[in-house]
């Protein structure tokens, strides 16, 4: 489950459905939320998609030394960290945004907030 205030239209999540005898079953892998109604409805059924190397590559990220970079326009969105401990935005200038992110929807939201652009994802 994801807190609804973390979700924005366009976020990509996994949608699950409770099973009759406990547990949950994956219904939609990589579902992109398309409306506020989706957010309200699916926030209780959605699970975040954890960042993996494969997911980062599908977001256009490239590993340069210890930094990941996503190029856009004539610049790059630069972040550091690890899959286990989370990532943080650095801007490539030694500054560090103190908010860690671990999941795809969080990366999407931070990217949009800091660049004003949607993150292109090829799932």
Image (cartoon, grey):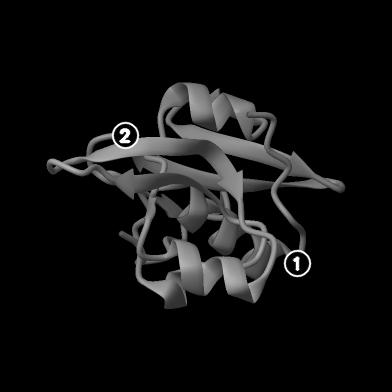
Q: Quadrant of residue 26?
A: top left
Q: CA distance from mark 1 to mark 2?
A: 25 Å
Specify which label sits upstream in the sequence, 1 or 2.
2
Q: Determine the residue positioned at 68% across, 69% down.
A: 35
Q: Is residue 17 above or below residue 10?
A: above
Left or right side of 18 for 111 = right
Tag 2 residue: 83
- Residue 118 lies, in percent from the top left, at 74, 55
- Residue 61 lies, in percent from the top left, at 61, 32
Q: Is residue 57 above or below residue 71?
A: above
Left or right side of 36 for 120 = right
Q: Quadrant of residue 49?
A: top left
Q: Determine the residue positioned at 45% across, 38% down.
A: 27
Q: Bin the neighbour count of mark 1 within 10 Å (Cα to Cα): few under 14, some 14-19, many 20 and up.
A: few
Position of the N terminus, as image quadrant, is: bottom left
- Residue 109 lies, in percent from the top left, at 56, 62
Q: Which mark is residue 116?
A: 1
Q: Determine the residue positioned at 63% across, 29% down.
A: 123
Q: Secondary structure at mark 2?
A: loop
Outermost residue toward the front in this view: 20
Q: Secondary structure at mark 1?
A: loop
Q: Is residue 52 above or below residue 1?
A: above
Left or right side of 92 for 26 = left
């Amino acid at each position: 489950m994801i807190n609804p205030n973390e979700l924005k239209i366009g976020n990509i999540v996994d949608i699950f459905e409770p099973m009759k005898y406990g547990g949950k079953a994956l219904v939609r892998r990589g579902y992109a939320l398309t409306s506020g109604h989706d957010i309200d409805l699916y926030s209780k059924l959605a699970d975040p998609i954890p960042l993996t190397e494969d997911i980062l590559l599908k977001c256009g990220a490239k590993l340069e030394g210890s930094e990941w970079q996503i190029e856009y326009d004539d610049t790059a969105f630069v972040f550091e960290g690890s899959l286990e401990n989370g990532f943080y935005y650095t801007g490539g200038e030694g500054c560090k945004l103190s908010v860690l992110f671990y999941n795809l929807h969080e990366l999407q939201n931070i990217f949009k907030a800091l660049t004003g652009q949607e993150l292109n994802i090829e799932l």
